Image: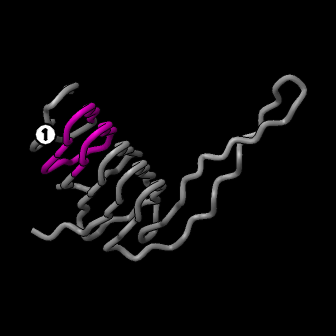
Amino acid sequence: STVNDGDVIVKDVSGQYSVHNVNGTVEMTNVDGSGTAKTVNGELKVFFRGNPQNNSSFSTINGDVDLYFLPKFSADLRFKTFNGEVYSDFQMSSLPPRQPEEEHTSGKFVFRADRFTGGRVAAGGTEIKIETLNGDIHIRERHD
């Protein structure tokens, strides 16, 4: 983890991870596991050696998110970008939107939606949440 003017580089890790940055890139190479990776102002790139088997999340505010999965990738993706596009090397089918959560506050009903779009790759399964405010999301097939 770092805060100002530094990139976080992670290589050859297995298991659970939690990687955070503020002003700089997060790049993870040869990752086999699941967890969270995020930065505020910077790109986020993850090259998987083993596709995630547990729920994971990847986010940045200002930057692209590039995730490189192995060819036999299967997951349920939830993604959101405000000023950007989502691109995938994998064929995807749409997931239905989640139902808004209902709250009762001061005698009023409040509905909260997560505003994530969903896509299922192959048979689905593990949920992978990907988010950027100002940037593109790339779901790529890793070719070594």
In the depicted view, which residue is nearer to us: 87 or 84? 84
Q: Quadrant of residue 112?
A: top right
99 to 11, vertically: above or below: below
Q: Residue at x 42, y 71 (%)?
A: 122
Q: Residues within 10 Å of mark 1 (few under 14, many from 20)?
A: some
Residue at the far top in the pictured view = 106
Residue at the far bottom in the pictured view = 91
Circle 1: element type:
strand
20 to 30, vertically: above or below: above
Q: Quadrant of the C terminus?
A: bottom left
**Mark 1 lies on residue:** 10
Coloring basis for residues:
one colour
In the depicted view, which residue is nearer to us: 24 or 103? 24
Q: Amino acid at mark 1?
A: Val
Q: Residue at x 24, y 38 (%)?
A: 15
Tell whether position 19 is magenta: yes
Q: Which residues are magenta?
A: 17-45
Q: What type of secondary structure mainly makes up the magenta span?
A: strand
Q: Residue at x 87, y 31 (%)?
A: 108
Q: Residue at x 18, y 55 (%)?
A: 47
In the depicted view, which residue is nearer to us: 20 or 4? 4
Q: Answer left or right for 132 relative to 109.
A: left
How many marks the image carries: the answer is 1
Q: Quadrant of residue 50?
A: bottom left
Tell whether position 18 is magenta: yes
Where residue 103 sits: x, y (%)? 77, 33
Where residue 100 sits: x, y (%)? 71, 47
